[in-house]
Structure formats: C-alpha cells, structure tokens
Image (spheres, rainbow, N blue to C red):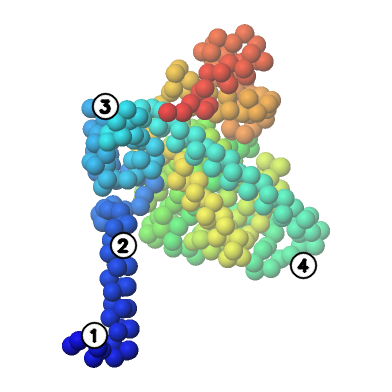
Amino acid sequence: MSASTETPTMRREHADDERAARAEYAGAERAEPVSAEHRAHGAEDLCAPGVLLYERAVRDGRVPVADAAPTPCLVEFGLLHPVVEDLDWLEPVSPAIALHRLLRVSEERVVAERRRGELLAETFEPLLRLGEHRAGVTDTPALRVLSGVERINAVISQTLAEASGELLAVQPRSGTRIPAERLASALDRDRALLERGGRIRTLYQHTLRHSPAILARYEQLNGDVEARTLDEVTERLLIVDRAVAFVPANPENSDYSLALEIRHPALVSHFATTFDRLWRLALPMHPVAAHHPSQNGVTHRQHAIAALLIEGHTDAVIAERLGMNVRTVRVHIAKLAATLGSESRAQLGYLIGRSGILDQED
C-alpha cells in the first residue's frame, strides 16, 4: 500500500509502533545484567557462591570483576573492592577487618535499639504512675498492671499454658537470686510449650554465656530451643505467640514486683520487631556456641568496655550496662591498659582513640 493511500489512523498506528520499538531498544541498552539466581540476604547469611568467590579472592589476592557479577553481595557488603591500578580486578578486604567493621555496625544498631527502648519507657512512665494509684482504671485487656511476684508468675504461666507457637525472651543479668521453686516452675512450663511443638528463643548478655546454671537449664530442655547473647540487651521482656508481652513496670527495682501485661497489637508488634532485630545481631550460644575473635590482643569484652570508656562512663555504669560487676570491669580495664601501654586512665582514653581498635577501617 502506498503512503498516499494510508489513512490518518493507519499513519498514527505506524508511528506508535515505531516509538514503542525505539523505547524497547533503548531500555534494553540501559539494562544491566542481574543474576536471576542471586537472592537478597544479609552479611550474616552469605550465599554459597559468594563464600566460594570470597575464599578464592583471599587465597589468590584478587579476582576479575566479571567473576563477581553473579554475587553482587560481596561488593555491597564491602568484602571486595576495585583495584586502584586496574579496575578490571577486585581485591578482598581482610576477613578480620571485615568482621570487625560489620560487628561495629551491628553494635551501633543495638545502641540505637536500646535508645528506642528508653524513649518507650519515658512515654509509659506517666501511665505506670497512674497504674500504681488507679489500678482499677488502667486494668484493661490491652494494658494491665500486675502487682506482686506470685501474681505475675501466675499470669505468665497461664498465658504460656494457652500458647502453642513461640516464646521470645530477653533475660538481662539480675542481682536477685531466684528461688529454686520458681526456677523449677519456669522450667516445667518451658518443657510443656516445647512438647506442644512450640519454640523458645532467649537473649542474654555475653557475661552469661558460660553461666553453669543457664547451661545446665538448657541441658534439661528438648525441642526447638535456642539462645544467643549480646553485650547489652533491653530490660526483661517476654513475648508469647507475638500476641502478649510482659515487661517490668518498675525496672529500677531488681525484684520485678510490678509488671505490665500488654495485649495491644501495635505495642506487641513493636516489641517483637525489636527482639527480631536484636536476635539477628546476637552471637549464638545454644545449641551451638560461636565465639568472638580477639583483635590485636584486645578481646571482644575489652572492646565493649573501651567503647564505653571513651564515652566517659564510670566503672559502675559500665558494669551495669554490660551486666558485669565493678571488680571484673576494673580487671578488664587493667588488661586493656597493659595491652595499649597506658599508665593512667586519661592516657588510656587517648591510646584507645589512637589505636583505632574502635574504628578500624579497611
């Protein structure tokens, strides 16, 4: 058909087809190749191809850029970076340096989560005072004040007896000695939940990793039960089936004689999300324990103490934050000073900053 016999409608259709073809070609030119098999994941869960390529890079000193295309996670997490002299190659970051950097990022997230918890406590403080004086007004299905250790344990036991999913728990170090009968009761209700097919996840502080009482307790539990540890954790927290949460209403008192039973979906979801994020950052303790490597003669615990030292905290505050006693903190400070060659506390802070143990980069 000649151009003279084309109708206006036909000419518009031909023009539209031509524009669409040009757009499709331009899009294809701009598109970057992406591995269809590579899945999104975190640094703590490296994909198998990424692990193999990183091992090869560490062993050989460098790998071609093309070989890293199917595993973009290695560049994203800073495990590989371009060779300045030849951009067609990638060289690895030392595993020790990479681990330190990733752990530091994790610890910063823990501090941020702890600050969020403190802000939440400040928000609830007026409600707690109101609950102490007008318990009848605040006792609602969404938020209820529980008074007395026996009452609190009874409600927790009843809630767990009706649960079938999971128990999430944060157990910070406490100076209060728990009676044997209460420990036995808690062990029995945990066993019952596991026997019904439930699971238990618990977060402790690093200082409790080798506690004989805690390790003996896990030897008596069978089923889907795990424990992990962090330098710092939130105040005591129990979440049952992601539907009910229990938090101390008087955290300044170590006897935990006042608690909040929370059933408000938004609040329980907030607590569960906080727990999940802390869990991903934590170091496995049970059933298989992992260990922090030392760096330049400085242990992980000394690293945590050093971070708080340069913030100006006293020995007592550091001990409370890390779940340790003051004497142990001072022993670690002395060892840290010996490692860095410090002769005074003021000089120690200077040497910590100068050594780069807190901010060493690749």
Marks 3 and 4, how far apart in space?
68 Å
**Residue 175 image position (x, y, % from top left):** 63, 35
Residue 3's label in the rendered image is 1
Can you tell which mark lies on residue 61? Answer: 3
Q: Earlier in the sequence, mark 1 or mark 4?
A: 1
Q: Residue at x 50, y 46 (%)?
A: 278
Q: Position of residue 226 (x, y in %)?
A: 41, 46
Mark 2 lies on a secondary structure that is helix
Residue 25 % position (x, y): 27, 64
Along the line of sight, which residue is nearer the eye, 234 or 253? 234
Q: What amino acid is found at the position of numbered circle 1 in the picture? A: Ala
| Outermost residue toward the left in this view | 1
N-term mark: 1 or 3? 1
Distance CA(mark 2)–CA(mark 1): 28 Å
Disc 1 to disc 4: CB gap under 8 Å: no
- Helix or strand or loop: what does disc 4 sit on? helix
In the rendered view of the protein, which quadrant contains the N terminus? bottom left
Disc 4 crowd rating (10 Å Cα; few below 14, some 14-19, many 20+) is few
Residue of label 2: 26
Kind of residue at badge 3: Gly
What's the residue at 58%, 16% (across, down)?
A: 351
As helix, strand or loop, the secondary structure at mark 3 comes to loop
Q: Nearer the viewer, mark 3 or mark 2?
A: 2
Q: Is residue 257 above or below residue 104?
A: below
Q: Residues within 10 Å of mark 3 (few under 14, many from 20)?
A: few
Q: CA distance from mark 1 to mark 4?
A: 85 Å
Q: Nearer the viewer, residue 283 or 249?
A: 283
Q: Is residue 51 above or below residue 201?
A: above
- Nearest to the eye among marks 2 and 4: give it: 2
Name which residue type carries label 4.
Answer: Val
